[in-house]
Structures are given as C-alpha cells and as structure tokens.
Amino acid sequence: DELRAESGGQRFAAVAPAGDWRTHLLRRLPPLTWPPTRRTLSAGPHAVFCYGGVGPAALREHCEAPHLSSSAAALRGAVRIYGGHSVAWGGAVASLAPRAGGCVWGSLASLTDDALRRLDAIEGADPADPYGGGGAARRQDVGSVWVDGERVDAVLYLRRDVAWRGPPSDRYIAACEAHVADVWDEELAAAVGLEVLDEAGELRTQD
C-alpha cells in the first residue's frame, strides 16, 4: 500500500519513494547543461581540461610541446563515463556527462592554437568544425574547472559515441590512473578504475 501521512484531518502521499532519498533529490534537480559558447575559435592560449588516457606526458608528445606543463584540476558538476569502442585502446574510452554533485579529477594545460589543432586530430574532432558533431569527438566549453581554489573557464573533449559495448581495457584504465597520479596522488588515481559508469551514469563492472 502507498504510504500515507495524516495532518489536520488531511491525508498526504509520501513525498519520496522508498530507497535512498539522495538519489530521489538528484533526480528532482534541474539537469545541468554546459554553455554553447565557442571560446577557442578566438586566438589562444587556451585552457584545456584533460581527464582520460591523454595525460601530461602524452599531451606534450602529441602537441609537440616538450616544455608544456599541466596542473592538477577538477571539473565540478560532471562524472566520467565510458562508452564506444576504441581499436587503439581495445575497449571503451572516457567521456563526460553533467551531474549535480559530481567531480572529475584531471589536469589543466595551456595550449597554443597550433597545439590545440594537433590535439583535435588526436581526439578525432572535425577540423572544419571542432565544436560540431562531425568527428569522433568535439570540443566543449566549460566554466567549472577548479585549479588551486580558483575557477577557470576551459575547453575539453566529449566523445560522440558513448553507447555501452563493453568495459574499457585494463590498459586504458591504467593510462587514466597514471594521468591522475601524475598531477594528483595515488589514492585519487586508484578511484578512477573503481567506478566505471556507462552513458546513463549507471555503475558497470569490469566483467
């Protein structure tokens, strides 16, 4: 039977379903969205938030910037998800989804226009429209990256295909963990492989 509460002779339906009230509360919050801006089409340098298998060392190599430095950074209001299938990595790869209360640990680097275009090629963004959906990934502006207690506007990459076809490979998880460990610490890095979420934000196992 539906739970009821009585007050002043009136009967009221229970205000929350059975289960964890925090889950119910999050479902009632308005969905988070990211801005439709295209800030990186203006001249750089550009603050780039990285969170997947491309850590500081790989970024220096791919962007041909041997002296590039990265800082520990966190994106609030999002969770790391996995989906699609990468032949190079042998499984799903990381993307992001907005979620109230979520936090993604990663790194922030400042890239020139040329370096950002090289990163477009690595990520698979459409060279004609890096913010569009014509490539394997696209640029996305965000305004909730935190570095040393300061909020920073940045750009990141989102995957176009995030459908769940299986888990990420151990090699990819290891690369993501190494990325976080490089700028944060081993404890946060270990948490990366413990929470593998699909495109719906549901927890998946590594089986």
Image (tube, helix red, strand yellow):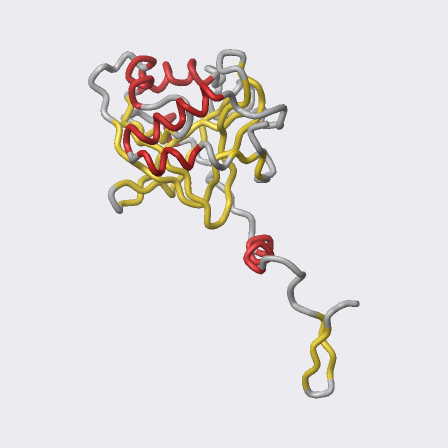
Residue reaching furthest right?
1
Q: On the image, which quarter does residue 57 sit in?
A: top left
Q: On the image, which quarter does residue 19 sit in?
A: bottom right
Residue reaching furthest left?
67
**Which sits in the foreground, 24 or 37?**
24
**Which sits in the foreground, 193 or 160?**
193
Residue 7 is situated, as x and y percent measured from the top left of the image, at: 68, 84
Q: In the rendered view, does 38 fall on the left or right side of 4?
A: left
Q: In the rendered view, does 114 fall on the left or right side of 127?
A: left
Q: Quadrant of the N terminus?
A: bottom right
Residue 93 is situated, as x and y percent measured from the top left of the image, at: 51, 24
Q: On the image, which quarter does residue 9 sit in?
A: bottom right
Task: Identify the residue shown where x is 36% and y is 14%.
Answer: 118
Residue 98 is situated, as x and y percent measured from the top left of the image, at: 50, 41
Task: Identify the residue shown where x is 51% and y is 20%.
Answer: 169
Q: Is residue 143 above or below residue 85?
A: below
Q: Is residue 17 above or below residue 55?
A: below
Task: Identify the residue shown where x is 45% and y is 25%.
Answer: 173
Q: In the rendered view, does 97 fall on the left or right side of 188?
A: right
Residue reaching furthest front?
207
